[in-house]
Image: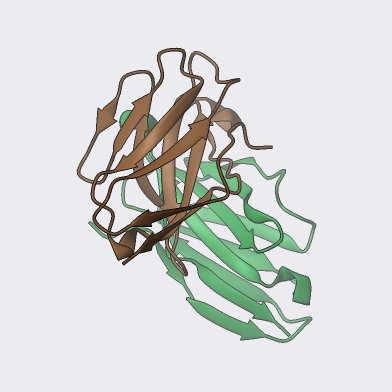
């Protein structure tokens, strides 16, 4: 079973920030938080990952709470092309089977004009 | 750089036929994964390889499924004989252990329909 909890769906207006929450209250000290998304009919796409510090790249920002029990993925200016299912995953990247990606049901983000 | 390349992109086959799906991982990557996605079960890990050696095949549904990785640049997933319940999208993915975070990159998938 996935170790994360996400809302099944969210809407966001085009041009606004999309804030996608994820709960991972049982995360271990050596587990990272990863975010992937899957646009319809395409393979999952890596977005960002982090351990305990906030991270930012060209696609998104990742905010991890101090206790690491939850995180938020932020798409600063959502576009229609950001409509996808977003998966939050915790894993230990270098540890055998624990390092594999176990996908839950994710959050279906719909960006509306 | 080219990403993970899968073929065929789409396949329709009759029940009982053999199906072979192919994957070329990103050059230099030492891990390769096969996933399956269905509406009912979502994305499931079937098997993964490290340095061409199968490490964990516990996700392979049954003996009709087999996967091989004869070299670092090629892997196959074979279903023999195929059944309608095997209809799904099959994704191949790869990663490089020493990259920061060991990020896993996915191909575009092979859409299999068994009739």
Is residue A87 shown to the viewer in this render? yes
On the image, which quarter does residue A34 sit in?
Answer: top left
> Front-most of B12 and A32?
A32
**Quadrant location, the N terminus of chain B:** bottom left
Q: Which residue is drawn at 32% across and 40% down?
A: A74
Chain identifier, green in the render: B
Q: Residue at x 52, y 60 (%)?
A: B91
Chain identifier, brown in the render: A
Where in the figure is residue A8, as x and y percent of width and height?
Answer: 58, 49
Where in the figure is residue A38, as x and y percent of width and height?
Answer: 45, 57
Where in the figure is residue B29, as x and y percent of width and height?
Answer: 37, 44
Residue A7's place in the image compared with B111, above or below, is above
Residue B84's place in the image compared with A26, above or below, is below
On the image, which quarter does residue A80 sit in?
Answer: bottom left
Q: Which residue is drawn at 56% across and 54% down?
A: B34
> Front-most of A83 and B101?
A83
Q: Which residue is drawn at 65% across and 66% down?
A: B78
Where in the figure is residue A52, as x and y percent of width and height?
Answer: 37, 18
**Quadrant location, the C terminus of chain B:** bottom right
């Amino acid at each position: 079973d996935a170790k994360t909890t996400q809302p099944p769906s969210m809407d966001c207006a085009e041009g606004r920030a999309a804030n996608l929450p994820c709960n991972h209250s049982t995360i271990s000290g050596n587990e990272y938080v990863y975010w992937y998304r899957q646009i319809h009919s395409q393979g999952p796409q890596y977005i960002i990952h982090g351990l305990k510090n906030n991270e930012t790249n060209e696609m998104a920002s990742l905010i991890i709470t101090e206790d690491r029990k939850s995180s938020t993925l932020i798409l600063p200016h959502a576009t229609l092309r950001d409509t996808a299912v977003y998966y939050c995953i915790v894993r230990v990247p270098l540890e055998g089977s624990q390092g594999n990606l176990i996908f839950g049901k994710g959050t279906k983000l719909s960006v509306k004009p | 750089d080219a990403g993970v390349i899968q073929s065929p992109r789409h396949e329709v086959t009759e029940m009982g036929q053999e199906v072979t799906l192919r994957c070329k991982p990103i050059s230099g990557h030492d891990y390769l994964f096969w996933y399956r996605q269905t509406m009912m079960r979502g994305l499931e890990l079937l098997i993964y390889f490290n340095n061409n050696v199968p490490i964990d095949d516990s996700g392979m549904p049954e003996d009709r499924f087999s996967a091989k990785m004869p070299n670092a640049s090629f892997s196959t997933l074979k279903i023999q004989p195929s059944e309608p319940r095997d209809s799904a999208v099959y994704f191949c993915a790869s990663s490089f252990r020493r990259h920061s975070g060991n990020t896993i990159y996915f191909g575009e998938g092979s859409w299999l329909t068994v009739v």
